[in-house]
């Protein structure tokens, strides 16, 4: 190692006041080894010179060449490496990490080289400065002279070729000072030691050479060196040590220790972040709410076997009302053509109201008389293929073959089972299906009675327990033994499949002709039925035919006359009600989250500025020891990354719990025992993204401000 300094000039530009010319053309060479003193009064430029030599500070004119290579050509990376591998610094203030052990302070230099202390180098370095026994001691527990020895050991551990000492004994009493000089003298046997001092006596006693500075210029040199060949020692130049940067474990421990440096700021910041991240996740569940998927999920959960569609009409601009009772056959045909299904069936309309089973039903409780729940709403032409395609089970008898025959759904059979069958004034108890099959079932309309023979009973999959679970959260609101069908019917009145009658093919033609005077109407279809089958995509496509009273877009139909079609079932309306509420929440929720994120980012900024300014000196020491900007970023990334990860984990937990609670209250509010919102992968991503955004934005500014400073300014804590 040969160092050539040529016409070095350094000007400090002072914001207010005259610029300071700290070095005014300094030229000299330095040998490979020995102890060189730079002597001079305070303010003459000694420290400046040393900082330039060590790569802690830049210069304005002239050059410093190390092994023939100009420092000016060094990139930031090369300067870091220069500090890390070739130079050891010892400052007047020892610049130790006070709260760490002697051993750790020395080991830090190794961490910065990404190397482990496998060969006992720390112990060896401590031994060489006579501190073997104090390895585990905290630095704030040892004397000034011992601290300076630790600082020397730390500088030595990298086996630097150049040891730069800036008034190393300045803070020590003269006796301890002597010891340090002795130690440095000893070390200068196989390396170059440059000592800055204003102690002429020691300089002359220990120095192999004394260079005196005054006002930024050399005024004397005890044994100047001849100009060396610039191409000195090519071997050494190529032997650049590799350097991997700060070890992760070290960066992590350091970063994490910073988290609690400002506990109050940290706590406030954490609280804010938790609120923000949790809100972002929970609110996103509402944004993620998909009405149609909720419908699909609900129908699946209810074990639905068929869709039922009706027509809706436009009331005003975007309000549609379900036409519960009937639609013309051509609308039903159009609706059927819009569906992605294999077959469609119609529930035909029979009367202005319904066909009551009153003539045959026994002891009907008073409160049920006059209710329309023990009646048929309409009829479906059905045969074996119907049962097969829909997955309905004919539990007894056979399908109707003539217009005088009928099959009743299990739901209605249960009325007879509960209340008995009236046969010409005699009450007959009905226990089994066969007790009823073959009997005449009379339906009362307002004008006449229709009489049909019962040939079979079909199970339309009215699983009350299953529906109750979805609709009422598992508590059926009906009376003893399922006898009170009133609430059940509220649930099933919409799709009408459970109280329709099943008749033979051709019944529609027969019925409309036979009863032509009374039932002559274009509007003859109550519901369009289709099997609820196929892939989720197919189901969703059908579910989307779903204009609603609230905000559905009309599908099909004639927009001119305001018709559209509507999937009807009891849950559908509730699901739409919920969507309406969600839409209202959505109107302002995004703004609320945006405000929260901004406030959090500001607080993270405040918190990060706090730790960064607290740790400025420590960072400065690391930089002097050779830490690169990347190393510093690593440390703060570990700090804030850990902070953010903690906040994210807690927020996700709270978010998931909160979502469950919220979902339960939605289910209660809308009388549905099925989930509305759920906390999933999407919400986790949202929380992580929001957290990353807030933390990066909050930390970036103070960190960049720190990074653009020169190491010398960071150590000196200059703004
Ligand atoms: P020494 O170490 O010999 O006491 P320095 O090298 O620290 O002297 O300082 C040389 C001159 O430069 C002094 O006049 C000092 O006030 C000035 N100086 C040092 N650092 C700065 C700085 N960052 N900004 C402005 N002036 C500075
Ligand atoms: Mg100084």
Image: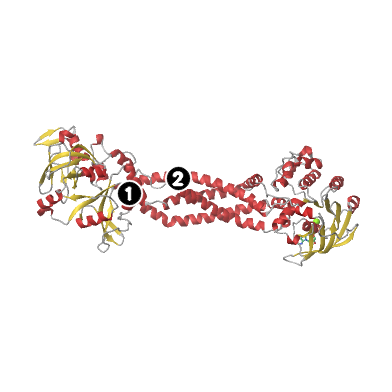
At 19% from the left edge and 42% from the top edge, which residue is drawn? Answer: 374
| Residue at disc 2, secondary structure | helix
Would the CB of label 2 be found within 8 Å of ligand 1? no
Give yes or no for contact between labels 2 and 1 (Cβ–Cβ under 8 Å).
no
* Residue 223 place in picture, x, y as percent: 90, 57
- Ligand 1 resides in the quarter of the picture at bottom right
At 61% from the left edge and 48% from the top edge, which residue is drawn? Answer: 638
* Residue 145 place in picture, x, y as percent: 81, 44
The answer to whether any part of residue 324 appears in the image is: yes
The C terminus, quarter of image: bottom right
Specify whether 367 is left or right of 554: left
At 83% from the left edge and 51% from the top edge, which residue is drawn? Answer: 193
Mark 2, residues whose alpha carbon is within 10 Å: few (<14), some, or many (≥20)? some
Please tell me in which quadrant of the rendered image residue 548 appears.
bottom left
Specify whether 195 is left or right of 358: right
The answer to whether any part of residue 717 appears in the image is: no
Sooner in the amino-acid sequence: mark 2 or mark 1:
1
- The number of numbered discs placed on residues in the rendered structure image is 2
Comparing 646 with 295, the one in front is 295
* Residue 632 place in picture, x, y as percent: 66, 52
Q: Residue furthest front?
A: 235
The residue where tag 1 is placed is: 574
At 27% from the left edge and 58% from the top edge, which residue is drawn? Answer: 564
Specify whether 518 is left or right of 339: left
| Residue 229 tag number | none
How far apart are labels 2 and 1 at the CA level? 22 Å
Q: Residue furthest bottom?
A: 18
Comparing 457 with 97, the one in front is 457
* Residue 353 place in picture, x, y as percent: 17, 49
Comparing 174 with 438, the one in front is 438
The residue where tag 2 is placed is: 658
Would the CB of label 1 be found within 8 Å of ligand 1? no
């Amino acid at each position: 190692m040969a160092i050539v300094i040529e016409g070095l000039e350094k000007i400090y530009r002072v914001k207010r006041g005259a610029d300071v010319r700290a070095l005014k053309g300094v030229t000299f060479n330095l040998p490979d080894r020995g102890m060189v003193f730079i002597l001079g009064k305070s303010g003459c430029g000694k420290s400046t010179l040393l900082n330039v030599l060590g790569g802690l500070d830049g210069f304005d004119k002239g050059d410093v060449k190390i092994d023939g290579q100009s420092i000016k050509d060094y990139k930031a990376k090369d300067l870091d490496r220069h500090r890390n591998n070739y130079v050891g610094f010892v400052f007047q203030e020892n610049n130790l990490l006070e709260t760490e052990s002697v051993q750790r302070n020395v080991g830090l230099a190794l961490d910065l080289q990404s190397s482990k202390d496998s060969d006992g180098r720390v112990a060896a370095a401590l031994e060489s400065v006579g501190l073997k026994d104090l390895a585990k001691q905290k630095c704030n527990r040892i004397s000034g002279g011992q601290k300076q020895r630790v600082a020397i050991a730390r500088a030595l551990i990298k086996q630097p070729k150049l040891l730069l000492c800036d008034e190393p004994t300045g803070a020590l009493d003269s006796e301890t000072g002597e010891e340090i000089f002795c130690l440095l003298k000893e070390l200068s046997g196989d390396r170059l030691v440059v000592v800055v001092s204003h102690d002429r006596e020691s300089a002359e006693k220990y120095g192999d050479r004394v260079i005196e500075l005054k006002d930024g210029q050399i005024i004397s040199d005890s044994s100047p060196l001849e100009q060396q060949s610039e191409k000195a020692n090519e071997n050494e130049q190529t032997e650049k040590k590799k350097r991997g940067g700060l070890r992760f474990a070290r960066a992590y421990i350091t970063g994490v220790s910073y988290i609690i440096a400002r506990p109050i700021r940290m706590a406030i910041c954490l609280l804010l972040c938790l609120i923000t991240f949790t809100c972002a996740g929970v609110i996103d569940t509402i944004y993620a709410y998909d009405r149609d998927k909720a419908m699909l999920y609900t129908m699946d959960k209810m074990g639905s076997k068929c869709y039922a569609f009706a027509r809706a009409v436009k009331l005003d601009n975007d309000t549609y009302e379900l036409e519960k009772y009937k639609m013309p056959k051509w609308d039903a045909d159009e609706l059927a053509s819009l569906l992605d299904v294999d077959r469609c069936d119609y529930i035909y309309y029979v009367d202005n109201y319904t066909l009551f089973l009153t003539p045959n039903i026994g002891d009907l409780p008073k409160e049920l008389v006059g209710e329309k729940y023990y009646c048929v709403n309409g009829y479906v032409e059905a045969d074996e293929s119907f049962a097969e395609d829909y997955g309905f089970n004919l539990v007894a008898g056979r399908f109707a073959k003539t217009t005088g025959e009928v099959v009743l759904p299990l739901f209605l059979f249960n009325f007879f089972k509960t209340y008995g069958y009236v046969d010409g004034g005699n009450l007959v108890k009905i226990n089994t299906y066969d007790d009823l099959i073959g009997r005449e079932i009379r339906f009362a309309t307002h004008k006449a009675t229709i009489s049909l023979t019962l040939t079979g009973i079909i199970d339309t999959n009215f699983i009350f327990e299953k529906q109750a679970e979805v609709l009422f959260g598992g508590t059926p609101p009906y009376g003893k033994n399922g006898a009170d069908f009133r609430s059940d019917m509220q649930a099933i009145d919409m799709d009408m499949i459970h109280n329709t009658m099943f008749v033979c093919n051709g019944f529609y033609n027969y019925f409309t002709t036979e009863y032509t005077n009374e039932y002559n109407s274009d509007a003859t279809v109550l519901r369009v039925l289709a099997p609820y089958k196929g892939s989720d995509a197919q189901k969703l496509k059908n579910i989307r035919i779903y204009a609603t009273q609230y905000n559905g877009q009309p599908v099909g139909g004639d927009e001119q006359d305001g018709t559209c079609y509507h999937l009807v079932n009891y849950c559908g309306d509730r699901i739409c009600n919920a969507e309406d509420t969600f839409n209202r929440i959505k109107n302002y929720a995004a703004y609320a989250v945006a405000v929260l994120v901004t406030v959090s980012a500001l607080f993270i900024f405040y918190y990060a500025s706090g730790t960064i300014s607290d740790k400025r000196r420590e960072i400065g020491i690391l930089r002097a020891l050779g830490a690169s900007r990347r190393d510093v970023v690593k440390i703060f990334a570990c700090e804030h990354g850990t902070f953010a990860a903690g906040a994210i984990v807690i927020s996700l937990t709270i978010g998931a719990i909160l979502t469950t609670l919220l979902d339960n209250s939605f289910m209660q509010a809308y009388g549905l025992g099925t989930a509305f919102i759920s906390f999933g992968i999407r919400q986790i991503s949202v929380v992580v993204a929001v957290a990353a955004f807030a933390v990066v934005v909050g930390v970036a500014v103070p960190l960049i401000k720190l990074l653009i400073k020169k190491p010398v300014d960071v150590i000196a804590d200059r703004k």
